[in-house]
Image (spheres, helix red, strand yellow):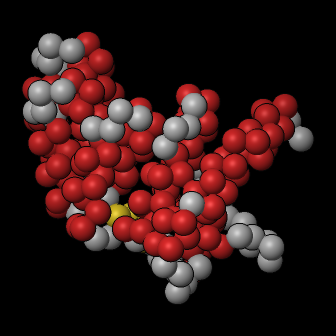
Amino acid sequence: MSAARTVLTVAAAVVVLPLAMRARETGSARASLVPVSMSVSEEKEPQATASDVQAYLEGLRGANAIQCEIALSSFNSWSSSRAPDRDSVAWNVAMVIHRRIATEQIVPELVGAMRSPDNCVARIAARLLGRSKLAAARAALMTALRDENAQVRRLGAIGIGFSDDSTASSQLVRALADSDERVRAAAAWALGAVN
């Protein structure tokens, strides 16, 4: 096993699994999760339920910077375990980032989460909105680009970058003139990502 793979394996065991277990142990997470009728690999394009997203965000609340980066890096990989001893509740919560948001009812909550003082929750919410194919999620990200809060504008640009929506290019070009340097950098990255 390579050194990098060993580090990632240890990081997952030490950081990500406790986060998933913490979400599982909260009464709201356990009560709000709906069993998935199909396994993730059987679905053509997996869908995240509102309760999955809520439990995932709650499980990340209070995560330290390292835990957050590991959770964020999960957007770039896929892990599929078929182990018979897998905890299905923790699995559903942990795998929410690999599913698209299928219902508009969660969009306002994700928009609110983008304003969270918890940086990790705000960043995850922006990416989940970006991965959604819902018109309401795209509209929310476009609106975020014009928000008075620079952090929300930056997250809106990042969310658009994860959307692969090249129709947002003109709004991102306008964001290149933003007064905040981090917003300009996020807009530049997002332009590259969607084009």
Drawn side of residue 27 relative to residue 82, left or right: left
Image quadrant of residue 143?
A: top left
In the picture shown, does residue 36 fall above or below 69? below
Image quadrant of residue 27?
A: bottom right
In the image, residue 26 lies at what x, y percent? 57, 60
Drawn side of residue 56 relative to residue 21, left or right: left
In this view, the residue farthest toward the front is: 27
In the image, residue 83 lies at what x, y percent? 79, 72
In the picture shown, does residue 90 fall above or below 62? below
Residue in the picture at 63% in, 49% down? 19
In the image, residue 73 lies at what x, y percent? 56, 40
* Residue nearest the viewer, comparing 64 with 177: 64
Q: Is residue 139 visible?
A: yes
Residue in the picture at 28% in, 55% down? 109
In the picture shown, does residue 144 fall above or below 101? above
In the picture shown, does residue 104 fall above or below 185? below
Residue in the picture at 26% in, 13% down? 181
